[in-house]
Image: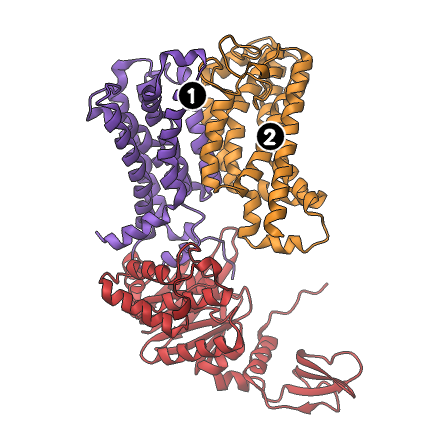
Chain colours: A orange, B purple, C red
Amino acid sequence: MTAALRYECRMMLRKRSMWIALGLITLLLAGSSAAQWRDLFHDGDARRVMGSVALLLNIFLPAGYGCLIADRLVRDDRLGVAPVLDATPASPAGRLAGKYLGVCAAVVLPMALLYFGWAVPYAAVTGGWPAVGWALAGFATVLLPAVLVVGAFALAVPLLIPAPLFRVLFVGYWFWGNSITADVMPTLAQSVLTPIGAYPLALFGVEGVIAGPQPGATLNFLRPEVTTATAGLSIGLLLVLAALTLCAAHAVRARTTR
Amino acid sequence: MNLQLWRHEVRRAGRVAWIAPPVTAAGVVLLAVVDRSDGAAGRDALRNLFAALELALPLIAGVLAASLVGRDPAAELLLTTPVRYRTVLLRRLTVIVGWTAATALAAAAVLIPAGRWEHGPVAGQLVWLAPTLWLAAAGWLAAAVLRSPGAAGGIVAVLWLLQQVLGGPIQDSRAGRLLYLFASTRGADPGDWAGNRAVLLGTAAGLGAAAWVLLGRAERLVHTAVTE
Amino acid sequence: MRIDITGLTKRYRGGVAALDGLDLTVPTGMFGLLGANGAGKTTLMRILAGLLHPTAGEVRVGGHDVTTRAGRRAVQRTLGYLPQDVGVYPDLTAREFLDYVALLKGLDDGPSRRRRVGELLEVVGLTSEAGRRLKGYSGGMRRRVGIAQALLADPRLLIVDEPTAGLDPEERIRFRTLLAQLAGDRTVLLSTHIVDDVAQTCRELAVLSAGRQVFRGTVAELTREADGHVWSVVTQGPAPAGTVVSAVPEESGMRYRVVAADRPGADAEPLRPTLEDGYLALNLRTRPAAPAR
């Protein structure tokens, strides 16, 4: 598992296209909301600011990464590597877990660079050093769970449908499941299953983040009141969702390679 | 124009290109029919369909255009034929955009008589055409630059999400309003609509032209960097 | 169709020189290109096919300068190209795939195109399998489809890169015979590291090493490179000095066939060289010395 993790991560980080895409996405994100970034940099409420930055990154970057890594598992079959790896003594479950963690690590690293790359100057100029602590909290409770969910979906679902279709559906899902107001249509947004982390973000006091019961919305049973416990529950449920998705991927692979 | 060749390219487009646009259009209609949330009170299936033409179809065209370069198993062979490979890719792009357009026109044929159409029956086609061409051209250019369907698809995804989520901040400036993809359904200033569509078409042409130039360099498209 | 190459250099990003001032002339007919992996063969093939641009030097194919766009187009109109890794569309049948490539090669007339596709399917022995999707084809069958597509437009120049890799012995013999038959008034450039393919089909050949030409001549001349350097040694001890061509276990010990500059032992018996021996002897003579440790 460790070897799969290490080499998957290394292969991903060597992809020039990933870094170019990340650069372009960063430029687009900065250009589209320059005023917002400027205002955040001069806002003294470190907790809210680091939550807001986590939200801004989390709305866009995992969706881009989901598209990027959509073929990492099916790629092994296409390149003819799968039979070679299947013939090794390493357990398929361990390899899958290693691949998953390697992909997630490769995705998390650039996100961490961006997030902490923003947090450190912000802490030095405006927010003070507690901002770094809030950044660590935001990273662990908001960015990381989102990447773990996206990584599981992006590895598993393309085993069942073509990667381009996955990309279209995934972007649609990401928008529908995160950004739609719950009273407009049935959605997972603002619930404990919102992958951008509405519940932990609400605890950061981020403006515009809505979580908890919404009058007139369907699926309100997924929207308990926001508390530390329900934020923890939300993170736990997202991790369980990721684990279940991976188990499904393992079962599909086992069936197709048998 | 060789119809036999087009027939092959139509098949090359793949099932996703054929299924995704009509299924998406049908899906949004179905969603409106089954939706029981309070927000659904002011909408109906046809209103949803009109919005989907501008919001969803361009995403499909963009992601599929982004998948055109980098996964063609026969690219090396085709690069050595007298037909330029970028012409082959342009044909494939035309099939993708053409089918998306056919789906949109079919939807328009329902929406116009039902009175759920805006900007007139002819000019109103720019509701879907301008963002579809723009995102398709952006996806094609991203594909030409990155030669990775995943990375290029990621760019299209983020572009689409940015326009959806940050529609307000983007439209704070005139330049942003002119380049806003969803000005028909979520535009702030109706007076900018015609200008917005013209700018989108113009910039789409620019993006497409840039991709055309890049795709003319065969060396970039030969899959692996060879040292043998 | 004659190929004239002068001072051809190709450097990849990072400064790796795949070809380093190569001078080579290829006459009409069958011509072999030998070299180890990394010698620059595939790069040369790709330059001739118009896929890569040279960093420096001149390449003329049938009088057309392939460093210009017009020259490349002119060559591609008369080119049949079989790449080392032939890629096909798995969801098409062999007949459909060949029809598609034929259209791209300008065979617009339907009946004559279909006839040509049928003929070539027959030539490569795939007529009975022509209606099956390519995803169900073995590696050798895909290679045969690749060969068929290269011949579609009746090319004057046929560039084949490792064409027999993945073919079974019978297919290999059949294919190289076909190539030799096609050579007549065409140029067939056969790049390979399987020496026997060249020995059985080519009269002339060149050997590349580290992006340069280290030999240009006939098969007989390359074979003569090993004259007096091929030995048979039977020993129970370690392998004798030199390049071991083969090792066969016998009752009295291991019988080695070696190519060595000097007699490897008093009981070594001289042998008549083959082309493979000649190639190895050339390598011994031209290979850059390993750096001292």
Question: Is residue C291 toward the left or the right of residue B128 in the image?
Answer: right
CB of mark 2 within 8 Å of CB of mark 1? Answer: no
Judge whether B223 appears above or below A16 on screen: below
Task: Name the residue nearer the viewer: B39 or B208.
Answer: B39
**Residue A171 spot, x, y in % from top left:** 47, 30
Task: Name the residue nearer the viewer: B40 or C137.
Answer: B40
Q: Dot 2: few (<14), some (14–19), or many (≥20) neighbours within 10 Å?
A: many
Asked if one can make out residue A162 in the rendered structure from this viewpoint, the answer is yes
Which amino acid, mark 2? Val
Quadrant of residue A199 within the rendered picture = top right
Q: Dot 1: few (<14), some (14–19), or many (≥20) neighbours within 10 Å?
A: few
Determine which residue is flagged by label 2. A149
Judge whether B216 appears above or below C76 on screen: above
Query: Which secondary structure, mark 1?
Result: helix
Pointer 1 chain: B
**Residue A179 spot, x, y in % from top left:** 49, 19
Disc sitting over residue C107 in the figure: none
Asked if one can make out residue B65 in the rendered structure from this viewpoint, the answer is no
Pointer 2 chain: A
> Looking at the image, which residue is at 38% across and 52% down?
B218
**Residue C17 spot, x, y in % from top left:** 50, 59
Query: Which secondary structure, mark 2?
Result: helix
**Residue A163 spot, x, y in % from top left:** 48, 41
Q: Nearer the viewer, mark 2 or mark 1?
A: 1
Q: How many angstroms separate mark 2 from mark 1 (CA)?
A: 28 Å
> Looking at the image, which residue is at 30% across and 71% down?
C154
Task: Name the residue nearer the viewer: C87 or A222.
Answer: A222
Which amino acid, mark 1? Val
> Looking at the image, which residue is at 44% across and 47% down?
B70
Determine which residue is flagged by label 1. B34
Do callouts 2 and 1 point to residues on the same chain?
A: no
Quadrant of residue A228 within the rendered picture = top right
